[in-house]
Image (tube, rainbow, N blue to C red):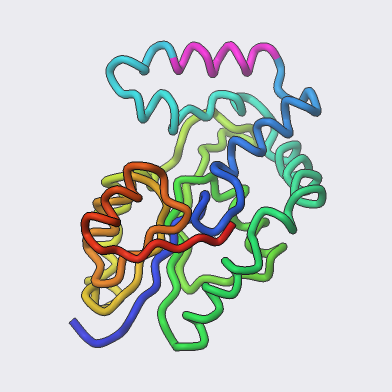
Amino acid sequence: MSGKIAAVFDLDQTLTSVRSLESSFIMFLLRKRQIGIMNLLHSADFFLRNIWRDPVKAKKRNKMYLKDVPQAEIEQLSQSFFSLQGHGLIPGKSISLVNCHKRLGHLTILITGSPEILVRPLLAQCGLHFDHLYATRLKVTGDRYSGDIEGNHYYGIEKERLVRKLESELGFSLRNSFCYADSESDIPMMSLFGNPIAVNPDKALRKKSLRSDWQILATT
């Protein structure tokens, strides 16, 4: 590998001030009464059918709250959501951290399980630009969301697989590169890097960081 250095970031609770960008958006939709009873039933049914055999799918890949909702409607609602909350979702410390790596000439990469339809407008509002962005895409049938994911859902082991692929494709050195993340599910990805940094870590990641002498950083 070449000496190129990358800085890889998770989004939720790593760069944002909230544990989950998508959950915050769902709560916004509920307060605005924009999620109908059928959407809630679709979501509950998906959860119950998958919780025992695949808890991650049941919880993290459950997009049935958007089933049959017009794409244009969600775009408008997301604009309202970000106009109300957007500027407080990514703290100044997080923005400065990303920009610091950019000034150093590092390759900046964002990998998140959050929906791309929320990630891109959030970054635009905060003036953040990444060299490469990987977020979860939601499937659209006609002009409506199907409630399914299209392609990869970047969570847990999928993040590790993507990083290994990017190391080869982009030619950066994992030993010299940085990885910022906040949760236990990110440990497989973080363990690949020479400079793993736990940001606002959950209990399990904090324990792993202390045991492995990983840096711990607070941005909120």
Quadrant of the drawing holding the C terminus: bottom right
* Horizontal side of residue 143 vs 131, given as left or right: right
Kindly identify the residue that appears in the image at 44 percent across and 56 percent down.
10
State whether residue 152 appears in this view.
no
Kindly identify the residue that appears in the image at 78 percent across and 23 percent down.
33
* Horizontal side of residue 94 vs 186, given as left or right: right
Tell whether position 41 is magenta.
Answer: yes
* Horizontal side of residue 193 vs 146, given as left or right: left
- Of residue 188 and residue 167, the one placed in the foreground of this image is 188
Counting from the top left corner in percent of width and height, residue 64 is at: 54, 24
**What residue occupies the far left of the structure in this picture?**
1
Task: Please state the total of marks drawn on the protein image.
Answer: 0
Counting from the top left corner in percent of width and height, residue 91 is at: 64, 62
State whether residue 13 appears in this view.
yes
Kindly identify the residue that appears in the image at 55 percent across and 42 percent down.
20
Look at the image and give the residue range highlighted in magenta: 37-47
Location of residue 77 by image quarter: top right
**What residue occupies the far front of the structure in this picture?**
210
Location of residue 125 by image quarter: bottom right
* Horizontal side of residue 170 vs 137, given as left or right: left
Counting from the top left corner in percent of width and height, residue 132 is at: 45, 68
Question: Is the residue 160 above or below the residue 177 in the image?
Answer: above
Question: Is the residue 31 above or below the residue 203 in the image?
Answer: above
- Of residue 219 and residue 10, the one placed in the foreground of this image is 219
